[in-house]
C-alpha cells in the first residue's frame, strides 16, 4: 500500500521493470513446483497479477528502508496541502500531498506524497525537510519530514 501512496521516486521505470522480472521469477517457481497451476489458467493469471503487485511493493520498500546512503536534506516551506483523489466517484486512489519549493524537490516534483499521519501534522508555511536518498537499488527516492533545528 505504501509503495503506491506515499513513497516518491525520481524514476519509476527501473522499479517497474525490476518488479516485472521478480514477479516472473516468482511465477516460474510456482509454475515449476505446483503441477495443479499448469492446468488452471485463471489461477495462473491470479498468481501473476498478485506477484507483480507484491514484488513492486517489496522492491520499493526495500529500496527506501534498506538504503545505506545518508542522502541529503533540503529545507523548504509547505506552500499548500491537498488530498488528490482519482478513479471517479468511488475514489480508487487517494494521495495526501504537500507542495514545496521546486528547488527543494527532486525532478521538480513540487507536489510530494506523504503519509496521512504526517499530512495531518503539516500546516501551510511550516518549515519542512525534503530528504533525498540514493536507494538500495540506486533508484533515488525522496520524502518530506518535519524540520528539526
Image (cartoon, rainbow, N blue to C red):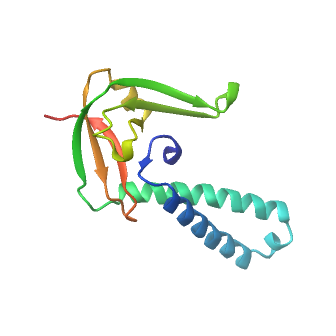
Q: Nearer the viewer, residue 14 or 148?
A: 14
Q: Position of residue 18 (x, y in %)?
A: 53, 66
x 49%, y 26%: residue: 83
Q: Nearer the viewer, residue 96 or 110?
A: 110
Q: Nearer the viewer, residue 99 or 53?
A: 99
Query: Viewed as shown, does residue 133 lie left or right of 85?
Result: left
- On the image, the x and y values in percent for residue 74 come to 22, 42
**Residue name at image x 29 percent, y 37 percent:** 145
Q: Position of residue 86 (x, y in %)?
A: 61, 32
Q: What residue occupies the far left of the structure in this picture?
A: 149
Give the answer, above or below, for where 73 lies relative to 92: below
108 versus 133 height, above or below: above
Q: Answer above or below: position of 17 versus 28.
A: above
Which residue is painted at 28% across and 45% down in the image?
131
Residue closer to the observer: 124 or 67: 124
Q: Residue furthest right?
A: 39
Amino acid at each position: 500500500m505504501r509503495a503506491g501512496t506515499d513513497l516518491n521516486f525520481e524514476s519509476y521505470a527501473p522499479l517497474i521493470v525490476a518488479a516485472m522480472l521478480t514477479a516472473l521469477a516468482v511465477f516460474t517457481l510456482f509454475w515449476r513446483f505446483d503441477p495443479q497451476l499448469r492446468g488452471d489458467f485463471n489461477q495462473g493469471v491470479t498468481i501473476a497479477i498478485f506477484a507483480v503487485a507484491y514484488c513492486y511493493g517489496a522492491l520499493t520498500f526495500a529500496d527506501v528502508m534498506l538504503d545505506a546512503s545518508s542522502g541529503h536534506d533540503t529545507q523548504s516551506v509547505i506552500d499548500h496541502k491537498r488530498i488528490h483523489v482519482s478513479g471517479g466517484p468511488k475514489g480508487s486512489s487517494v494521495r495526501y500531498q504537500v507542495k514545496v519549493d521546486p528547488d527543494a524537490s527532486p525532478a521538480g516534483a513540487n507536489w510530494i506524497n506523504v503519509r496521512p499521519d504526517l499530512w495531518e501534522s503539516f500546516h501551510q508555511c511550516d518549515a519542512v525537510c525534503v530528504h533525498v536518498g540514493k536507494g538500495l537499488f540506486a533508484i533515488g527516492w525522496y520524502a518530506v519530514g518535519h524540520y528539526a533545528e
